[in-house]
Image (tube, rainbow, N blue to C red):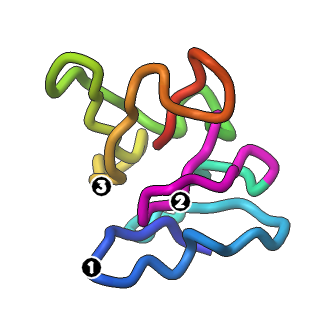
């Protein structure tokens, strides 16, 4: 499975089969299906990464971080502070 950008039809939003989501450019492990949860946005949402270095992020604006692959820098989306299934859990 690959994590991919949204281009009018995100195919992994409602995909909940067991496995590891990897970067679509370099196959770096990003997220486990165990950390995926249903969310109202059109993008897949996760509570944690597989490895500490799975992603890198930088503050883009208050409450939002730009998330990139920790290996190749491929853009993965955003993390929104205090957004998720529990307070303090973020969405990637």
Part of the protein shown in magenta: 34-48
Q: Earlier in the sequence, mark 2 or mark 1?
A: 1
Q: Residue 44 carries which label?
A: 2
- Which residue bears the numbered disc 3? 74
Q: Residue 14 placed where, x, y %?
A: 64, 73
Q: Residue 77 placed where, x, y %?
A: 32, 50
Residue at mark 3 to residue at mark 2: CA–CA distance: 16 Å
Q: Magenta residues: mostly which secondary structure?
A: loop
Q: Is residue 73 above or below residue 63?
A: below
Q: Does residue 83 belong to the magenta stretch?
A: no
Q: Residue 62 placed where, x, y %?
A: 20, 17
10 Å neighbourhood of mark 1: few (<14), some, or many (≥20)? few
Secondary structure beneath label 1: loop
- Which residue bears the numbered disc 1? 7
Residue at 53% across, 39% down: 54
10 Å neighbourhood of mark 2: few (<14), some, or many (≥20)? many
Q: In which quarter of the image is residue 20?
A: bottom right
Q: Image check: 34 left or right of 43?
A: right
CB atoms at circles 3 and 2 under 8 Å apart?
no
Q: Residue 45 placed where, x, y %?
A: 56, 50
């Amino acid at each position: 499975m690959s994590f991919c950008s949204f281009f009018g039809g995100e195919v992994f939003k409602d995909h909940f089969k067991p496995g590891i989501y990897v970067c679509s450019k370099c196959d770096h492990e990003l997220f486990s299906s165990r950390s995926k949860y249903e969310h109202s946005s059109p993008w897949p949402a996760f509570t944690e990464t597989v490895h500490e270095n799975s992603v890198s992020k930088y503050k883009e604006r208050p409450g939002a971080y730009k998330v990139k692959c920790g290996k190749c820098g491929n853009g993965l989306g955003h993390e929104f502070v205090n957004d998720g299934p529990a307070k303090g859990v973020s969405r990637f």
